[in-house]
Amino acid sequence: MTSTTLSAFVLSFLTVSLLAEERSLTKKLPLPGEVFEIEEQTAFLISPEIDVGSGEMPWIWYAPTLPNLPGQAEEWMFERFLEAGISIAGIDVGESYGNHCGTDNYSKFYQHLVEDRGFSKKPGLLARSRGGLMLLNWAVANPDQVNCIGGIYPVFDLSSYPGISRAQLAYHLPEADLDLYLSKF
């Protein structure tokens, strides 16, 4: 390996590392909280300042968690959850529309909060818009791990949003196959 090749490799590695660090550190939350990664996906956690003792921490699972969400519009609502002793958490799985990869990452996030951090095994799910696609698909696959489901204009039907032609790319299925299996999703 030449010194030029090695220098280019090191520079490339450092750039990728800095971008990953910058990505996770620049997520802006509407309230003070923690931003961290699960399987290279940006996640967040906003917790109340009260101690729940030896019990499990109740939590609301908010979706979607995209680069700009949750945003300031959720601040008032999140403050009410915190006052009630309830944490708010979410993970960014991109525009997966509830596909298998997204639900797998949701399961890893759930496992982290429950097993590693002592959170309740039954979170409340709060779906905003297309976040409904992810949360509902995860809930259908894990019904015994859901306390309740609430929504802010939630999307629960791929055909209404984003439409079969856009969703089929995330599901890696031809349009006709996704349309055929729509009731499953």
Image (cartoon, rainbow, N blue to C red):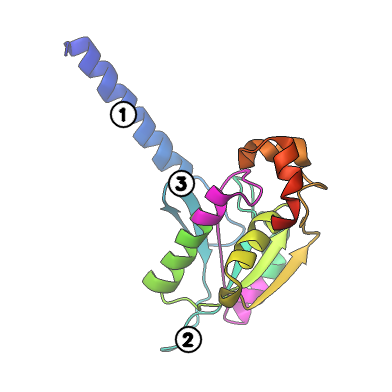
Q: Which residue is mark 2?
A: 52
Instruction: Give, as a three-letter code, the residue at label 1.
Output: Phe
- How dense is the environment of label 1, judged by Cα within 10 Å: few (below 14), some, or many (20 and up)? few
Q: Nearer the viewer, residue 87 or 121?
A: 121
Q: Secondary structure at mark 2?
A: loop
Is residue 72 placed above or below 180 in the rendered structure? below
Q: Residue at x 75, y 38 (%)?
A: 176
Image quarter of residue 166: top right
Marks 2/3: CA–CA distance: 28 Å
Q: Quarter holding the C terminus?
A: bottom right
Taking 161 as reference, is 78 left or right? left
Disc sitting over residue 13 in the figure: 1
Disc sitting over residue 24 in the figure: 3
On the image, the x and y values in percent for residue 172 come to 61, 38
Query: Is residue 97 found inside the magenta-colored segment of the image?
Result: yes
Marks 1/3: CA–CA distance: 17 Å
Q: Nearer the viewer, residue 138 or 63?
A: 138
* Of the image marks 2 and 3, the number of the one nearer the N terminus: 3
The region drawn magenta spans 79-104
On the image, the x and y values in percent for residue 89 come to 55, 64
Q: Residue at x 37, y 70 (%)?
A: 116
| Residue 33 in view here | no
Q: Secondary structure at mark 3?
A: helix
Image quarter of residue 146: bottom right
